[in-house]
Amino acid sequence: MALRIRKYPDPILRRRAQEISAIDDEIKRLADQMIETMVLAKGYGLAAPQVGVLKRIITIDVEDDFYALINPEIIKKSDETEVWVEGCLSIPGIEAEFPRPAKVTVRALDPDGKEILLERDGLAARVLQHEIDHLDGVLFIDYLSQTKRLMLLKEYERLKKEGPKARKDTKVF
């Protein structure tokens, strides 16, 4: 069953998610529901706070990478950065370009409780950083200048008034 994606400025998007101490059937079910929600919403990724759950779990669907990660943490970031355009399922219709580290190493658990280490670059690195930010209450608009952020949020309010037909139908974070 797909879950409702919380939209900005829902306060849950600004809260820090709690670490998962035990992977039980409820957590596995949440991971499955998040994957379904992400796919239906045409997202590259989804974080539990985006569906109203303050647990440290994300789902990713980038190229050949398709998985759920529990308690993910970035343990290494490259000094090199790349500038990409980013959007968010929780702020539909809004995109902005800004730099992030080009490569990351992430440690996490899979839904079976096995520790995994992912070294990613390109789009996968970008999506991992974006979704892990959500677990800490950080949104992509936080990386923008105040002027750019205010301009985009004004546009977001306009799009909300116009409804879903005003939004782009592209895959987002």
Image (tube, rainbow, N blue to C red):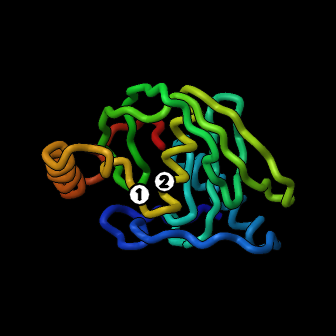
Nearer to the camera, 149 or 168: 149
Is any atom of residue 156 visible in this view? yes
Q: Which residue is mark 1?
A: 138
Residue 11's spot in the image, x, y percent?
36, 73
Residue 149's spot in the image, x, y percent?
21, 48
The residue located at (34%, 38%) in the rendering is: 168
Q: Which residue is mark 2?
A: 133
Q: How many marks?
A: 2
The residue located at (70%, 53%) in the rendering is: 69
Q: Are marks 1 and 2 in contact (CB under 8 Å)?
A: yes
**In-image side of 27 versus 1 (left or right):** right
**In-image side of 154 versus 80 (left or right):** left
**Label 1 is placed on what type of residue?**
Val
Nearer to the camera, 112 or 137: 137
- Crowdedness near tag 2: few (<14), some (14–19) or many (≥20) residues, C-alpha within 10 Å: some
At numbered mark 2, what does the secondary structure look like: helix, strand or loop? Answer: helix
